[in-house]
Structure formats: structure tokens, C-alpha cells
Image (spheres, rainbow, N blue to C red):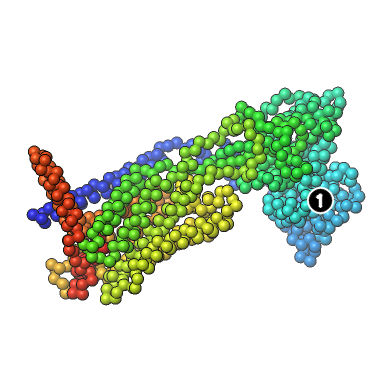
Amino acid sequence: MVSCRAWNLRVLVAVVCGLLTGIVLGLGIWRIVVRIRRGTSAPSSGIPTEFCRNGGTWENGRCVCTEEWKGLRCTMANFCENSTYMNFTFARIPVGRYGPSLETCDKSTPNAGNPRAVRLCSLSQYGNIELQNVTIGNCSETLQTLEMKVGEAGASLLNNISSEVQILTSNASMLTSENIVSATQVIGQIFNTSRNASPEAKKVAVVTVSQLLDASEDAFQSAVAADNDDPLTTLIEQMENYSLSLGNQSVVEPNIAIRSANFSTENTPSRVLFSVKKGASGSLVSGSTHLETDVNTLNPDENTELQILLNMKEGRNSTACGFVVYQNDKLFQSKSFIAKSSFSQKIISSKTDGNEEGQSASVEMAFSPKYNRDEFQLNSYACVYWNFATKDWDTHGCHKQKGADRFLHCHCNHTTNFAVLMTFKKDYQYPKSLDVLSNVGCALSITGLALTIIFQVVTRKVRKTSVTWVLVSLCVSMLIFNLLFVFGIENSNKNLKTSDDAENTDVTDNVIPKTDTVSTPNPTCTAAAALLHYFLLGTFTWNALSAAQLYFLLIRTMKPLPRHFILVISLIGWGVPAIVVAITVGVVYSQNGKNPEWELEYRQEEICWLAIPESKDVIKSPLLWSFIVPVAIILISNIVIFIIISIKVLWKNNQNLTSTKKVSSAKKTVSTLSVAVVFGITWILAYLMLINDDSIRIVFSYIFCLFNTTQGLQIFILYTVRTKIFQSEASKVLTSLSSATRMKSLPSMTRPRLRIKMYNFLRSLPTVREHFRLLEPSVSTEDVTLSESDQAKESA
């Protein structure tokens, strides 16, 4: 009768586990089918792959081409082909650019490594692309020697100096901070009206300024830090004055555009509107600027990048005005605002020729924010001007205005160099909450782990085993990790409301931001990531310790465990992960502590887990050294031990035993699974998820989710449900419950009997005796194989 009840219990457990497995598998298959159907039936809302050709990128509804291409899909050539002139060879040159010769100055010359000549690629008056004559440089001249000569040079010599500087700055990638300081000093002298440089020399100097703006940001920062006189500020002032001297003409280079407008005293307009249109590439081109007079208001359209409306009547005695547009803010090195993103901040300058009091003429501006809308959201902006006294941005006299379009509107009561300093929030794609498959798996694991811990602690004396501590520690670590995963993996920042509409931006507060990228700190998420890191690393550590202990028990059966084994493995299991996590957080904070976003160097923003590095930073990433490498080492060692145990113990056949004593293949398989689960072997499926094929990767993702979210349930079934103690006592409880159901007519008798049986069950646990046959010297090899499963499930 007892064996029949035990058999029925086993059938019941098998049926329940089969149903749970079937439900989880069914949910997984259903999820795969739904995702496949969505992927095939949902219309594509984006742009087809490779719509933008020749290196162009799709941004904000259009193709942004490189300088060498233009057109709707970046398929129209915008360059001069490779050419040869005299003894000089030139590679492909974009329109509007000077191309350096491939021939460089000899190493023995002071100007070693710099190009010997440059050549301009331009558009003719009929729109044809054509190459201009070659300008040959002097290899004996350097920017430093030209800086010393320009102070005493006459007007005729300034032409040669301007050309030499333009040649020496043609390769922006080679420019150093010293080169930038020397070049700006020379150009400032050429633009100085007292030096009477020719218009041709000044136009070549504008080309040099454009080329300087291609230099690296680091070079400009070093130049400002090394030179207290700040030649950049002097150059900016000279450019403002130069913008008034062009008559009604314009000078447009890839990184700078200058436009002048002259009027008679009787026909001075009340307002002048200067506009810059969007181009196919990120560079300014001829025809991209437009000037209108007697316009009452700003009128930007979808092709407008920025507009400035100058009120001429407020500037007394003004008969001319000038505008300068800088493609980026490298000349304006701010101490209060630090730009971290790659989005260029355009600068617009306006100036009238009235007296200093006349410079109080008011201006209105509209800026089109230029950034990657797929990755960032506009957070706020400030309307600022460049204060020459403080050599930094200032908001005095400027305020923001409300606009009905997607432009950022500003108003200032004076004329100078203006900009909008924008701040952005990264548009993180927060994942949805855990799906049904993950929730069900984690719930089953949490329940199974809790029951396993209780069972192992309560029945330890009954089972008389010395390895319970390892299994309990593994279950505790895994249980806490699962709880943190369910309740702490999501970042609460996903619930914050954000708006990317310029119309909804706050216009009341015009404060200069400290940086152009902002984030919402979340110390709770960082703490959750650190705890997840610790307990998952701890789980793998206890997996490794379980493998080491089973190796000592099953392979080295005749030798005792090392001295103080439990104390040593406890220090390793709980201490090593803590040291790894502490060192990782400490190193990240020491390297990025001054950065308000230092947390994102350790964790992700999308979820509270370790940060996934960019391809160039993989070697330095905390994810690699503090998790992937240790886990890989543990998995490799566990697999090696698992193979040794499987071959030498679990699947070893002893021909001397009779067929009745041989262990069946089913029991061997269960024993193998018991060891595999506690060793964490199923985590190798995570590496199969790195396959580049999406259809294959999603299959392994669900298999990985199935096996690893239910790992706690597997431990409960293999190490608790299958034990004789659990089956015997659970059978008694089920029998009591069934008896109580049949005795509904005697309710007063049922409850006391149930209480008595439960009381007897709890009292009987310390008196039950179960032998752990693994270490008995007389046991056969096949019996060791069978008992190993019991040991793994009852005492590990």
C-alpha cells in the first residue's frame, strides 16, 4: 500500500511537472509565432536599407550626404577627380575645398610633412565643377616663422603670408595647438584694418579660418589653455569688423559664411533678415545664405537652418550691416559650457556700422536644432551671446521667445555673436516589462528555491550530510538574484515623461547649462545593478564550489575533504564576488567620478545591469573583466569536471554486477541532469545567443530563458521532490488531506486529526534515518552511480 501511494505521488509529480513544462514551452512557441507574424505583416515605417548612397545617412527625414556627394540619395558627384598639375598630384577634392598635394616637404626642411601645394575645386558661374590653378608653398616657412614676420610685413608681403598660412593649415588633422595659436595670430593681423591688407589676402584668410575649424576640439582647448592672451577672441572681433567691408557681397567657405549689406542714408531699411538654408551635407555652400530687407517678422520654413532679423532703426546712423555664420563653436571656447556630443553648435554674428551706442539694435533669431532625433531628445536651451570681456557665453539682454514652430526663438537687445546652447537627453529605448515566460519561470524558480532551502535546513540532521551548506548557499544566492531580477531590473526612469517638441520647451528660464547632455541620476538603479552583479557572480561562484566539492566526494573518495573546507568555501563563495564588485565600482568611480553621468559607465540606462560597451571600448569595459571573463572560466572548469564525473562515475558500467543491480539509463540520465543543473551548465546557451542570425538567435533566447529562469524549479525537483524523505512525508500529508475530504460528515473530528498528523510529521523529521551510501567502502561502482544522484539531490 505504501509503495502504491509513493508510486501515485511520483506519477502526480511527473504529471504536474510535465504540464508546467508544456505551458512554458507553449508560451515560448506562441511568443515566437507572434513575433514572426508581426515581423512579416507589419509595414515598414522606416527608410529602405541603403536608401542613402555613398556614405549618406538618413537623418530627420532626409539624406545627409558627405561633402563629395549631393542629391536626394547622395548619388550626384560633388567633387573634382584625381588630377595632376606640373609635378604635383592631387587626390579627389570636394567642391569648395582646397586639396593638398600628395607631395610633401622633405624631412630636411623646417616644414617637413606638410603639402607642397594646394588646389581649389570650385563651381563655375554656369554650375560646372572645375579645378583652379595650383598654389605652391615654401617648405622653408612655418607658421611660427610667419607669425614673427607678419608684424612688420607690408601690404604686398601680406598676400604671400596669407597664402602660405592657407597652405600650412590645409591638412587639419595635422594641426596642433601651437599651429592654431600661430595661425590665428597671423590671420588676426591680416584682418586688422590698420594693416591695409588686400581684399584677396583677406579672402584667402577666410579660407584659412574655415580650415582651422576642421581641426580637433582637443587642439583648440589646448590652444586656449596654453595662451593667456586668447588670440581666438581677437580673431572673432576682426571677423565681425570684416563682415562690414564686403559691400553687398558674400564669402562662403565650408565652415564659415560672411555676408555684408550696404545702404544709403535715405534708403536704410527698418529690418534686415539673414537666412541660412540647409544643405545636402553638413558644410556651408555657395547660395546657402539669403538676405532680405524690410521684413517684419521671422519666416523660417522646413529648409531653414537659422534666421536672424536685425532691427536697423534701433541702431542710429547705421548704413551697413554684416553677418558671420560659423559652422561650429571651436573658436568660442567656453569655460562654463562643455559640449560632449558631436552635434555642432552654429554661431551667428550680426553687426552694424553705427557707433557703439548704435550696437544696441535689437535682433530676433530662430535656430533649427540639429541633432539625431532617433537617439536624442531636446531637453532645454539657452539664448546666449559671446561676452568679449569675460571671454565666455553670457545671457545679459537675451531671452527666449515662444514659437509656434519647431524652431528655437531668441531675442536680444544688442548685436554681437549669438548662439543657442542646447541640452539633450538620450532617447533610451527602455524594454517592456518582463513577459509571461520570464514571469512564470522566475515565479516557479523563486518558489522552488525557497522550498529547497527550507527542506535542506530542516532535514539536515536527518540526512546526516556535510554538503548541505553548499547547496543552501547556491539556492540563497540564486533566490535573491531572481527576486532582484523580477523587482529591480527595470529602471524607474522609464516612467518619466519627456517631450521632444520645441514648442513645449520652457522659455521662462534662460540659464546657461553646464553641458549639452543631461541625464536623470538613479542611485537606486545603480545599487540594483551592483546587487544583481554580486548575486549572479555569487551564483556562478557557488556553482564552481559545488563542482569542486562533488569532485572531492566522487573522484577522490578515499581522501578526506581539505581542512576547514566549509570555512574556506564560504569565504570564497561570498567574499570573492564582493571583492570583484567593489573593485569594479571603485575603478569606474575613480576614473569618472567628476562626470555626473559616471553611473552609466558601470550600468545601462535601459535596465539596471552592467553597461554594454561600444566596440572600441570592449577591452576596458567592466562587463568583460568583472563578469564575462570570470563566468567563462567557471563554466569551462565546471564543464571539465562534469565530463570527468559523467565518464568515471555516472555512466561507468561494471560488468561484474548482475542485471538486477545495474542502474537503468533513465536513472543515469536523471543523475546527469542533477549534476548539470547544480553546475550551471545551461548558461552556455547564452553564448549561442550571440549568433548573428536573428531567427536562430531568438530560438536560443527562448531556450535559454526556459532553462535558466526555471533553474530554481529544476533544483527543487531534482534535489527535493525526488528525495525519499520528501516523498514519504508528502505522501502522508496527501493521505491526510484525502482522508479529510472523505470525512466531510465529521468536520469536528477532521481538523484535530489533520493537526495531529502535521504535528507528527514535524516531530518525525529528526528521527528519520536515511543512509548516504556514496561514501560506504563496500558499495559497488554501479551503486555509487545510483547513489550519486541521491547525494546530489539530497545533500548537495
Q: Position of residue 156 (x, y in %)?
A: 90, 49
* Closer-to-camera residue (322/67): 322
Asked if residue 97 is positioned above or below residue 360 in the image, the reply reads below
Please tell me in which quadrant of the rendered image residue 269 appears. Answer: top right
* Closer-to-camera residue (250/404): 404
Q: Position of residue 684 (x, y in %)?
A: 38, 58
Residue at 14%, 43% (x, y): give it: 751
Residue at 69%, 47% (x, y): give it: 335
Residue at 39%, 59% (x, y): give it: 538
Secondary structure under tag 1 reads helix
- Please indicate whether residue 448 sits to the left or right of residue 290 in the image: left
* Closer-to-camera residue (553/344): 553
Residue for badge 1: 185
* Closer-to-camera residue (327/430): 430
Asked if residue 381 is positioned above or below residue 204 in the image, the reply reads above
Q: Which three-letter amino acid code belongs to the residue tagged 1?
A: Gln
Residue situated furthest bottom in the rendering = 558
Residue at 43%, 60% (x, y): give it: 577
Residue 703 shows up from this direction: no
Q: Quadrant of the N terminus?
A: bottom left
- Please indicate whether residue 146 sits to the left or right of residue 92 in the image: right
Q: Position of residue 48 (x, y in %)?
A: 51, 40
Asked if residue 294 is positioned above or below residue 73 in the image, the reply reads above
Q: Position of residue 780 (x, y in %)?
A: 19, 72
Residue 566 shows up from this direction: yes
